[in-house]
């Protein structure tokens, strides 16, 4: 086996590290979700109550954190799985580009959904 | 004298090219190992059978085979301790075959060489030996026992799926030198394993841990390397 072939596998520390960081953020989000909705059970489930909750700084911060964490964690996980199926060279570049497009679209959609509570 | 039946994987690319099984009956006494059974077959029953061996003492790693559905060293596998009959002897699964029980280990050793398996110095080599505390030496007790038999490499699904993945053995050796306080390789070795054909291809399946005839733990070593790569690349802590 030629050593040049082995040298082609560049990068990897950031995707691996951020996958762990986002996993911790997901645990944080899950904890907040369970505590707020199932333990504290803040307010009745009405549109106004939920709107008020979504408009608070804490929930905007938490929800945006979750939005970025979920999108990154999910798509990076898909990428890790697909890389095991022989995505290399130009196929890998195309895969990365497709995942970035999907990620940006998902985050833009998430921001759009939050927009009314951000601008109020 | 009791007899054991050996069911052996045969493959000769120059004759038939097909894989087939052949059975041999071998008389044995208490201490017969599978490797000695193979010697008996080669000397008395069929001289064309091919297999690798060298030290006969579980030190060189040449005679790793898949015996009765497990990775074992033929030289340390006693026939009387094998429960299933016949004794099925296969080459290391999913390795390129040369003949009968002999695998092509070229890629395996190229990957081992690639991680620079030796102590490196950035500074001048010292005139006297580099001292190391007993505690620091104990960290290496486990990986230095690796005999490069290839069992872990053969058992790893990530190796099956990616030809260029370095595999558990090479990465265990990378750990052996990275964890060594005398080593100063820094980026010279880091770039060889800190990539998607290195440590990040390991998904902690732990087949390597089960397969290792020396009961080592390459998976744990690879996780240590992942942490070390983060410490060094992202936080700039080199030791």
Image: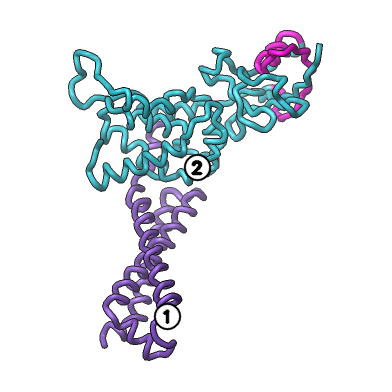
Chain colours: A purple, B cyan
* Circle 1 SS class: loop
Q: Is residue A2 left or right of residue B38?
A: left
Q: Quadrant of the C terminus of chain A?
A: bottom left
Q: Which residue is mark 2?
A: B162
Q: Name the residue nearer the viewer: A72 or B175.
A: B175
Position above or below: B17 against A113 = above
- Disc number for residue A16: none
- Distance in Å between CA atoms under marks 2 and 1: 49 Å
Whether residue A119 can be seen here: yes
Position above or below: A105 against B60 = below
Task: Tell me which segment is drawn in magenta.
Answer: B15-44
Q: Is residue A55 left or right of residue B158?
A: left
- Say few, some or many: other residues with alpha carbon within 10 Å of mark 1 (under 14 / 14 to 19 / 20 or more): few
Q: Which residue is mark 1?
A: A41
Q: Name the residue nearer the viewer: B101 or B209.
A: B209
Q: Total number of numbered labels?
A: 2
């Amino acid at each position: 086996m030629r050593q040049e072939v082995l040298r082609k596998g560049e990068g990897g520390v950031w995707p691996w590290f951020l996958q762990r960081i986002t996993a911790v953020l997901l645990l944080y989000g899950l904890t907040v979700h369970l505590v707020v909705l199932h333990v504290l059970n803040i307010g009745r489930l009405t549109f106004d109550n939920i709107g008020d909750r979504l408009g608070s700084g804490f929930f905007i911060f938490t929800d945006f954190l979750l939005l970025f964490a979920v999108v990154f964690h999910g798509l990076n996980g898909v990428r890790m799985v697909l890389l095991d199926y022989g995505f290399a060279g130009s196929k890998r570049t195309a895969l990365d580009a497709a995942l970035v497009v999907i990620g940006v679209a998902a985050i833009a959609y998430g921001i759009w959904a939050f927009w009314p509570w951000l601008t109020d | 004298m009791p007899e054991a039946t050996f069911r052996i994987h045969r493959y000769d690319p120059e004759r038939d090219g097909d894989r087939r099984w052949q059975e041999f009956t071998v008389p044995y006494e208490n201490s017969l190992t599978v490797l000695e059974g193979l010697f008996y077959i080669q000397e008395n029953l069929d001289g064309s059978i091919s297999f690798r061996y060298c030290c006969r003492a579980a030190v060189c790693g040449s005679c790793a085979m898949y015996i009765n559905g497990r990775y074992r060293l033929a030289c340390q596998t006693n026939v009387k301790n094998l429960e299933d009959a016949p004794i099925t002897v296969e080459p290391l699964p999913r390795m390129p075959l040369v003949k009968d029980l002999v695998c092509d280990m070229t890629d395996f050793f190229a990957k081992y060489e690639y991680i620079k398996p030796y102590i490196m110095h950035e500074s001048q080599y010292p005139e006297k030996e580099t001292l190391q505390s007993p505690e620091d030496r104990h960290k290496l007790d486990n990986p230095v026992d690796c005999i490069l038999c290839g069992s872990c490499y053969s058992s790893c699904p990530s190796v099956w799926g990616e030809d260029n993945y370095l595999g558990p053995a090479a990465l265990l050796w990378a750990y052996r030198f990275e964890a060594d306080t005398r080593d100063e390789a820094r980026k010279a070795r880091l770039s060889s394993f800190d990539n998607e054909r290195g440590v990040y291809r390991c998904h902690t399946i732990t087949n390597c841990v089960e397969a290792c005839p020396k009961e080592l733990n390459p998976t744990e070593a690879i996780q240590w390397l992942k942490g070390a790569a983060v410490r060094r690349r992202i936080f700039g802590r080199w030791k």
